[in-house]
Amino acid sequence: MNRRTLLSATTALVLATAFGPATAATPGADEKLAEKQTFSYRLLDQFPTLDPQLNEETAGSHVIQQLFEGLMNQDAEGNLVPGVATGFEASEGNTVYTFTLRDDAKWSNGDPVTAGDFVYAWRRAADPKTASPYSWYVELTSIVNAAEVVAGTKDPSELGVEAVDDHTLKVTLTQPLPFFPAMTTYATLFPAHKATIEQYGSDWTKPGNMVNNGAYNLAELSLNEYFKLVKSDTYWDAENTIITEVEGYIVNDGNQALTRYEAGEYDMMDDLPAGSYPRLKEERPDEAHSVPRLCSYYYAINLRPDAKEELKDVRVREALSYAIDRKVIVDQILQGGQTEAYNFAHPATAGFQMPEIDYSGWTQAERDAKAKELMEEAGVENLDLKLIYNTSESHKQIATVISQMWKQKLGVNTTLENMEWSTYLDIRREGNFDIARSSWCGDYNEASTFLDLVTSTHGSNDGKYSNEEVDALMKASRTSEDPNVEYTQVEKILADEMGIIPIYHYANTFLLNPAVKGFPYENVENNWYVKDFYRVAD
């Protein structure tokens, strides 16, 4: 399936029935519901924010998806289903999208959700005054004047989004983008309640202050420890929402988190300790799962003007990449179904054709020999590097093994620095590193969600890799009949220049209490909505 067939209908009126049922959980006739309908899960890190327009990471996204609802949602297979919008019409060659909003969507304070709430939120995300780390996402949508608004050369009021009336939202793009509706499932494009933000400022997301439009409301929040959500009575599909309470526990230590799961403290745990999956699958076959996840794990290389000179030499970057034995990482450390990565975009990406990357076909011995040769050619000896990563036993194990590979094969000395999530994000964004542990999870299911990250102006391109040909190819891919042609070229350039070091493609390895039903195992973006869950009696 290529990008132009990613959505089943993009040039005609699309109604809710075209997407299938929009309601929440649907237990089987032979399933007996538990008396207490709760769901709890473990988070590796404290999310920095619950503000949809300020969010930039996965942990916050999952919570925000329970609190807010965008124009469209996804079903268990990742297909689009109605959210606040019941459908949309694509016209003028996929450059104008008109969404019809349901008339029963309400905010948690009872106010109706209107098209104006989306206009306000999208302008807010693009406005430089908001300082959204995801303002680039608005630009990526190709909405008219988005690039100029983000750059500060045009006023947010000139963004190409219009509330035709309370229940009609019109979006105008600068170029055809068939997958634009899929982009509205990400938090940046969720609506926001203007009056609440103006009243409380940065405190608007606190319990008691927040006004949201999702299936759940924020009841409690204790930083780095715990949060609690409760079912919203004002949500348009509250009648079909079965889970009444959601609890999240922030536990950095993987082994401690696993112990607490095994003690029955929560229902779901991902980010399993490295190497634990085979044992858990054997011991808990109904609870341990491994499914593809649209994320790629890589090391960002600092290529800013003030970065280490040795890293600006492509031979050094290639040597560092070649010396990493990815098979050791996925087969001996992780052991959860992850696959070696020599390119950036995940192989499970819809319509993506995996490119042939030369060094992926070499033996590790051949890669090691080439790495040593390149370092000698570059005349680099006793290279000292600082590698940063966020606190996680798996990240630590991977960084430790890779640093040992670099030391043994190339004589590179690596200082490892770990830090908590928010601090790590800030330091990585500021460029205070030589190498940074990074990962990218698709914001939508199309290869550009990965490859746009290596363009010069992308807001999450923390290493500041830049190549004019890559920029031009990604721009051309927007209107290409077969964007895989451009994507293949970009992947080959990225491999030739080693702008980043791909390490592995994710699998989602997690434990889930069998009593919890409705989890979307086939959704490769790992977008799950608790409103679709229910709990059966033991």
Image (cartoon, helix red, strand yellow):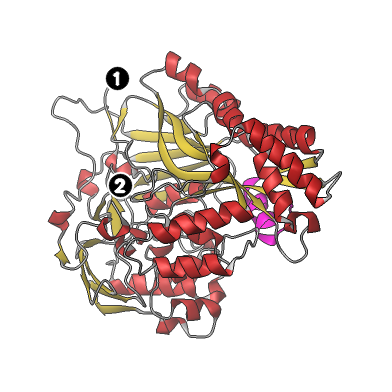
Question: Which secondary structure, mark 2?
Answer: loop
Of residues 197 and 337, the one nearer the viewer is 337
Looking at the image, which residue is at 33% across and 54% down? 214
Give the residue type at disc 2. Answer: Gly
Pointer 2 local density, CA inside 10 Å: few below 14, some 14–19, many at least 20: many
Q: Which percent across, then down, holds residue 122?
A: 41, 71
Q: Which percent across, then down, holds residue 231?
A: 32, 46
Pointer 1 local density, CA inside 10 Å: few below 14, some 14–19, many at least 20: few
Is residue 426 in the magenta section? yes
341 in relation to 352, above or below: above
Residues at badges 2 and 1 in contact (C-beta under 8 Å)?
Answer: no
| Quarter of the rendering containing residue 183 | bottom left
Dominant SS of magenta comes to helix
Give, as a single range, the part of the protein colored magenta.
Answer: 419-434
Is residue 163 in the magenta section? no
Q: Which percent across, then down, holds residue 496?
A: 60, 53
Q: In this view, does 389 lie to the left or right of 442?
A: right
Is residue 205 visible from the viewing direction of this image? no
507 in relation to 482, above or below: above
Q: Mark 1 points at which residue?
A: 538
How many numbered discs sit on the rendered protein? 2
Is residue 86 visible from the viewing direction of this image? yes
Question: Which secondary structure, mark 1?
Answer: loop
Looking at the image, which residue is at 52% across and 52% down? 57
Q: Name the residue under label 2.
A: 78
Of residues 104 and 3, the one nearer the viewer is 3
Q: Is residue 249 left or right of residue 185?
A: right
Q: Which percent across, then down, holds residue 116?
A: 32, 75
